Amino acid sequence: MANRELIIEDLHVSIDGKEIVKGFSIEVKAGQVHAIMGPNGSGKTTLASAIMGKAGYQITKGKITLDGEDITHLPTYKRARSGIFLISQLPSELGGVYLDDIRRAQPQESDFRVERNLEEELSSIGLDRELADRAINVGFSGGEKKRFETLQLSLLGAKLALLDELDSGLDIDALREVSRRISRMVKEEGLMVIAITHYSRLLKELVPDVVHVYEKGKITESGNFELAFELEKTGYQR
Amino acid sequence: MAENQLALRDLQSAHMELFSDIAEAQKSDRRRAQELLAQKPLPSATEEEWRYSRIDSLLAEVGSFEVSGAAVADSSRGPSIDGEFSGRITLTDGRIWFEGAEGIRIEQVDSSKEQSTFSIDSNDDYFRLFARGYAPVAVRVTVEEGYQLQDPILLEVELNAATTLVAPRFEFIFERGSSASVIEVVTGGGAASLLTPLVEVAVRSDAICTYSYLQNCDANASIVENVVIEADRASRVTYSAFGFGADYGRLRFDGRIIGDDVDMKVRACYFGSDKQMLDFRTFQRHIAPRSTSDLLFKGAVGNDAHSVYSGLVVIEEGAVKSDAYQTNRNLVLSPGARADSVPNLDIRENSVRCSHASAVGPIDPEMMFYLESRGVDPEEARRLIIEGFFKEITEAIPNLNLRAQIGALVANKLKGI
């Protein structure tokens, strides 16, 4: 855990030849939470997708290193296996595909901690057992989806969580429960978090070590926890 | 066209000669079908009901088929699906063997002494009339009134001889208040065969019918199957078709709701590969009021395969408060594959609820990304998504042995795509 770190250096990402991310750099250490805030259309979701290696998001320049390993050009599933986990703003629904299918598809079953503590995990994020046995996200409410994603984050034992607007679709209680579970992983397991959000309400629950302002494809300002509240008062065009 | 017609007429004559004793005995019921058939032009892809189909090339080949009186069905052979059965009917190359437990009556139909329960007219499918007019074998299965059969009835149709045409006919009568399930398995085909079975099912008042059809013919076979289900008052029908085999596999389903408060579910999953064509035509005809029909067909095509779904919901005058749903979804897995989907509604009554939907497209890249971002490798992710796509239907198959067999067939198809 001590050596755990994510280093992204001068990342440039293009979609269909158009550059969206224009020189993004960050260093996240074990047990740190970094918040990324920025106006609509600044490329935050593109950034998260590119770090996860989504098809069509072409990294044209820069480097992503996780625990010393260069993962810049690894396919998505290998990035996931190296410990990156993305919770999308709108998680997909997968008819006929189950949590157990994901468990069985892991290279070593022991990597997936479902056998050890599924019941405990379910209760810690307030999710009914019945939902865990249903097809992934099918018929789930917005809040249930986010809880279910958080369950997987925990069961897969990720090193780095990319949270793309985790707070969307969550009510106050659900946000608190999910954030507390993630905070516990941060403290106990050294989970690194990059949380993309528009609102400080998430950051009251999931307290960031660093807040970055991300505009037009790059970080324009960084600060501590207070920066998030300042931005909420003043907006990005200060 | 004239040549094709001649060839098929020759074939009909050959049938009559080979099975002349049956043909004579069943003459009166057959004659009407034969007369209707004589007035009906051969099917052609220019007709809406045969649009996209391979009927033209199929009929061009028909002249080369011979009618075979090959092997007698082997009664000692194990069933094609594991498990216990209330009844078993095995047809091999035109020869029949059957047995049934208490509560089921299985008999060869003698149309010279009785008229069929199922009326026909000139609008019926060509091959339905063909089977009614020329079937060498006709069998009726009756589930007696009030009987609730725990184990399914197994109907096996197997074609072993090469270059054979067989047009068997089966009637199932679910008497009032009875309940049973049927599993029909069609296999074989050898070098090149044409199989045109006709299945007619009457589900009387308050009866429950669960019918599963598995088509897994050999790669060179052609099959054109017709199924007609008439559902009477307060009956419950679930018909599920599973199409995997044959070079050309066609199923026409006619569901006719003739009584109030019927609940009819129609399901299918099909998976085409290589140069296969899997062709489905459905009719949900609401004649009586206050009934529901719900159709969901899901298909996948890979390599150079082609699937067709064409469906029509008809709400007749007087069928008030009908609910009818029709959905067809298709996954196209290879650049050379193609799926045509044509849903239609014909509503002649107010105060009804009807909907139709269809979709044709590749695997959703967002679903792939989701699974890959969970550490699932792309090949496995693709497999999970395709199998998951079918599970909505396959997980509802009540017979676990059939469910396992269909699961294996889907998995086997995936290996080649």
Image (spheres, coloured by chain):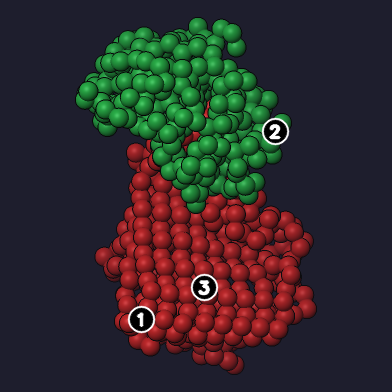
Chain colours: A green, B red
Badges 3 and 1: C-beta atoms under 8 Å apart?
A: no
On screen, residue B173 versus residue B38, left or right, reads right
- Write down the residue under mark 3: B264
- Residue ID at (78%, 78%): B102
Residue A95 vertical placement versus B157 (above, below): above
Three-letter amino acid code of the residue under disc 3: Met
How packed mark 2 is, by other alpha carbons closer than 10 Å (few <14, some 14-19, many 20 or more), is few
Nearest to viewer (mark 2 / mark 3): 2
Pick the residue in front: B232 or A111: A111
Three-letter amino acid code of the residue under disc 1: Ser
Residue B231 vertical placement versus B325 (above, below): below
In the drawing, what numbered circle is on residue A117?
2
Q: Quadrant of residue B60?
A: bottom left
Pick the residue in front: B189 or B393: B393
Element assignment for label 1: loop
- Write down the residue under mark 1: B351
Pick the residue in front: B70 or A37: A37
Q: Whole-percent x and y of residue B65?
A: 46, 61
Q: Whole-percent x and y of residue B24?
A: 55, 86
Q: CA distance from mark 2 to mark 3?
A: 43 Å
Element assignment for label 2: helix
